[in-house]
Amino acid sequence: MAVSFAEQIKRVTDKDNYSVNQAFCDWSEIKILQLKRREDRLDDTYKNFENISLRFRKHVLKKFGNWNLADLTAQDLIKHWEPLKDENGYATETIRKLCSYVKSIQIFARDAGKCQITHDLTQLSASYVFKAKERRPAIPFTELPWLFQKLEQSIRGYGVSYNVFFSVTIYIMPPGRNCMH
């Protein structure tokens, strides 16, 4: 695998003419090699990577693909991504992910010696205001005994769900703790 990585890094010799598209392709190849090492979740990971590729191609490569990576600025990306903001002016999850991909690709290109980058894009997400993440509603830990008592007293019309809920709850409880008290 190290030999394969070294070959990928040696491919580009002209450091002054390294396009955004080339950077994405090289970064993608490395990512795919890394994914192949993790065979346990390969199908889900490939689907996720396909989504990354589609998003990046649509919102970055379509406009900036032929640009030299060293010429790409945060201002260019911010201006281009302006329509992706929601109706309240908050940056969307797409923008958050694109910032992460651009940062990762730029760091890859710099560390691999493929491009002497003059514009720092690693802090691109700092230019956006993101909506605070909403936490999903959950029962407070102190009310769990009450919930378990109500479940024990209830009619077990959904036996499978009931049994799964209790088996998962018992599984995650630390040893020596009784979830009913």
Image (cartoon, rainbow, N blue to C red):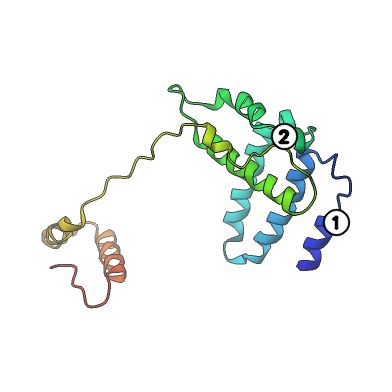
Split into 4 quadrants, where in the image is the N terminus? Answer: bottom right
Q: Position of residue 157 (x, y in %)?
A: 20, 56
Above or below, 122 against 172 in this view is above
* Left or right relative to 6: residue 173: left
Can residue 30 be seen by looking at this rendering? yes
User: How dense is the environment of label 2, judged by Cα within 10 Å: few (below 14), some, or many (20 and up)?
Assistant: some
Can residue 94 be seen by looking at this rendering? no
Circle on res. 61: 2
Q: Residue furthest front?
A: 118
Residue drawn at point x = 60 percent, y = 28 percent = 78
Above or below, 40 against 142 in this view is below
Residue drawn at point x = 68 percent, y = 55 percent = 31
Q: Position of residue 114 (x, y in %)?
A: 80, 49
Instruction: Classify mark 2: helix, strand or loop.
Output: helix
Above or below, 159 against 84 in this view is below
Mark 1 or mark 2, whichever is nearer to me: 1
Instruction: Classify mark 1: helix, strand or loop.
Output: helix
* Left or right relative to 25: residue 44: left
Q: Nearer the viewer, residue 86 or 144?
A: 86
Above or below, 158 against 174 in this view is above
Mark 1 sits on what residue? Answer: 10
Residue type beneath disc 2: Leu
Splitting the image into 4 quarters, where does residue 32 fall? bottom right
Residue drawn at point x = 73 percent, y = 49 percent = 110
Question: Of the residues under marks 1 and 2, which one precedes in the sequence?
Answer: 1
Marks 1 and 2, how far apart at CA: 23 Å
> Is there a contact, CB below 8 Å, between mark 1 and mark 2?
no
Residue type beneath disc 1: Lys
Q: Position of residue 72 (x, y in %)?
A: 72, 33
Split into 4 quadrants, where in the image is the C terminus? Answer: bottom left
